[in-house]
């Protein structure tokens, strides 16, 4: 899943902060975290990179990790029982994986990089730790993720992005 990071590729939570602040997508994250809140959240997340075409999430897999997109674009593909495929794109400043993160159900779609991507992951165990130590930040994040999921479910072409 992860690719080796080139020597010049560095991760700083401020890159994700800027991506979220400038995201204009209909399903963008919207919250007003302070710099201190972002730094606390960053301590619970893991940054990594994906190369073009690499798979992040497999449809049907059991995984409750949430992924924040700092840069790049992810394509989301859903294949139904009649072999029809639906697709959505998730760009920088947004999130993917919120469906299984909350439901603990198998992944509903496959997600792969549509170019080089920088991502931040937050798994369920780390979120539980965040909830216990910084409940206000965890609550604000939960509300923001719920809003993203609601927007995606309301906008028919974006429904496939709820993975």
Image (cartoon, rainbow, N blue to C red):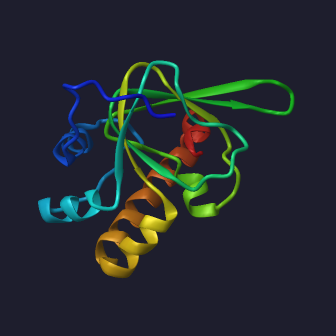
Residue at image x 33%, y 68%? 140
- The residue lying toward the viewer, choosing from 72 and 53, is 53
Number of marks in the rendered image: 0
Q: Compared with residue 92, is residue 134 higher up or lower down, i.e. above or below?
A: below
Residue 75 picture location, percent across and down? 52, 27
Residue at image x 21%, y 59%? 38
On screen, residue 101 versus residue 32, left or right, reads right
Q: Compared with residue 144, is residue 54 higher up or lower down, i.e. above or below?
A: above
Image quadrant where residue 64 sits:
bottom right
Residue at image x 30%, y 77%? 134
Residue 84 picture location, percent across and down? 78, 24
On screen, residue 42 versus residue 161, left or right, reads left
Residue extending furthest toward the right: 82
Residue 48 picture location, percent across and down? 37, 39
- The residue lying toward the viewer, choosing from 35 and 151, is 35
Residue 60 picture location, percent across and down? 73, 43
On screen, residue 46 versus residue 39, left or right, reads right
Residue at image x 65%, y 61%? 104
User: Quadrant where the C terminus lies?
Assistant: top right
Q: Compared with residue 51, is residue 33 higher up or lower down, i.e. above or below?
A: below
């Amino acid at each position: 899943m992860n690719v080796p990071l080139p020597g010049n590729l560095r991760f700083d939570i401020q890159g994700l902060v800027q991506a979220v602040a400038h995201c204009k997508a209909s399903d963008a994250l919207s919250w007003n975290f302070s710099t201190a809140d972002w730094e606390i959240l960053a301590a619970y997340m893991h940054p990594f990179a994906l190369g073009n075409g690499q798979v992040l999430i497999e449809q049907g897999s059991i995984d409750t990790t949430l992924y924040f997109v700092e840069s790049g674009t992810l394509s989301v593909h859903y294949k139904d029982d009649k072999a029809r495929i639906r697709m959505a794109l998730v760009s920088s400043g947004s999130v993917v994986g919120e469906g299984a993160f909350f439901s603990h159900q198998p992944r509903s779609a496959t997600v792969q990089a549509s170019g080089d991507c920088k991502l931040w992951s937050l798994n369920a165990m780390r979120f539980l730790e965040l909830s216990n130590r910084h409940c206000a930040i965890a609550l604000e994040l939960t509300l923001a993720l719920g809003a993203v999921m609601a927007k995606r479910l309301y906008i028919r072409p974006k429904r496939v992005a709820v993975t």
